Image: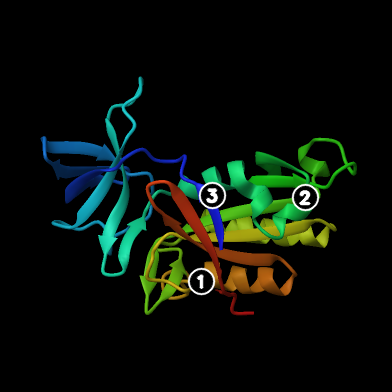
């Protein structure tokens, strides 16, 4: 288990979910009354965001925002699930050296482009190459997993052409001699493994199997935030290869 400080959220405000207004907006009920909040996840989230369910809000009322709060967690039978799709990139940006096998690298660059895709992280080993998209020694894509059925974390919860293209682009990285990683962050306490959601997106599942056969490395960590820390526990990835 890896433990990192919780620098991502302040004290969360309890609320009750009322309705989803659009992909990134919802209406909730707080002690102060009805509130429109931001949803930091474009997935369907229908198993988590339904009328009457308990949710948690993070105050982010800085200048330029239309909403004061961001909805970051939802109650499940197993505990709190964190729906925030920003969390994987935040963890990687600040704590990537603590995550095996990324600790073998010495420098990381977020949001770098290779080919026709922008990946979440490019990594280099010390003293090997200059900074730059084409010269990084490894490329990484991160995925947020919030859907769990029968203890299986399933990705995606809605068809994702972008996700499929990222996997196939990583196959090209491997073919050209680079290293490639896919990290799943399981943000639901009820899951103990991760696999492709073949029922919802068979094309992504096929691309994931192809990527695994090409030598791309898949890792998954269950993410369990508390008030002061975040626990990361590695869980198996079933690639279907």
Q: Contact, CB < 8 Å: mark 3 with mark 1? A: no
Tell me where residue 209 appears, x and y as whole percent: 62, 74
Say which element carries label 2: loop
In front: mark 1 or mark 2? 2
**Is 188 on the left-hand or right-hand side of 66?**
right
Few, some or many residues within 10 Å of mark 1 (<14, 14–19, 20+)? many
Taking 15 as reference, is 43 above or below it? below
Q: Quadrant of residue 128?
A: top right
Secondary element at image label 1: strand
Residue 4's label in the rendered image is 3
Q: In terms of image quadrants, where is residue 204?
A: bottom right
Query: Which residue is identified by label 2?
Result: 105
The residue lying at 37 percent from left, 53 percent from top is: 83
User: How far apart in space, not on screen, are marks 1 and 2 (Cα)?
Assistant: 28 Å
For marks 3 and 1 on the same chain, the one whose residue lies earlier in the sequence: 3
Residue 118 visible (yes or no): no
Q: Secondary structure at mark 3?
A: strand
């Amino acid at each position: 288990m890896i433990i990192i400080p919780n620098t991502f959220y302040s004290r969360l405000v309890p609320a009750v979910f009322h309705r989803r207004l659009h992909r990134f907006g919802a209406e909730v009920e707080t002690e102060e009354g009805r509130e429109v909040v931001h949803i930091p996840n474009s997935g369907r989230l229908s198993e988590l965001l339904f009328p009457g369910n308990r949710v948690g809000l993070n105050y982010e009322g800085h200048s330029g925002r239309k909403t004061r709060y961001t909805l970051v967690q939802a109650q499940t039978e197993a505990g709190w699930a964190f729906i925030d799709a920003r969390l994987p990139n935040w963890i990687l940006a600040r704590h990537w050296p603590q995550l095996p096998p990324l600790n073998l690298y010495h420098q990381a660059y977020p949001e770098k482009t290779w080919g026709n895709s922008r990946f979440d992280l490019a990594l280099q080993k010390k003293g090997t190459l200059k900074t730059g998209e084409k010269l990084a020694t490894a490329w990484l894509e991160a995925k947020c997993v919030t859907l769990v059925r029968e203890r299986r974390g399933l990705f995606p919860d809605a068809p994702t052409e972008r996700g499929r293209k990222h996997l196939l682009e990583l196959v090209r990285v491997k073919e050209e001699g680079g290293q490639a990683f896919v990290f799943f962050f399981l943000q639901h306490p009820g899951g103990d493994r991760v696999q492709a959601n073949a029922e919802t997106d068979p094309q992504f599942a096929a691309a994931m199997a192809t990527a695994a056969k090409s030598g791309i490395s898949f890792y998954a960590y269950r993410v369990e935030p508390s008030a002061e820390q975040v626990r990361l526990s590695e869980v198996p990835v079933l690639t279907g290869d």
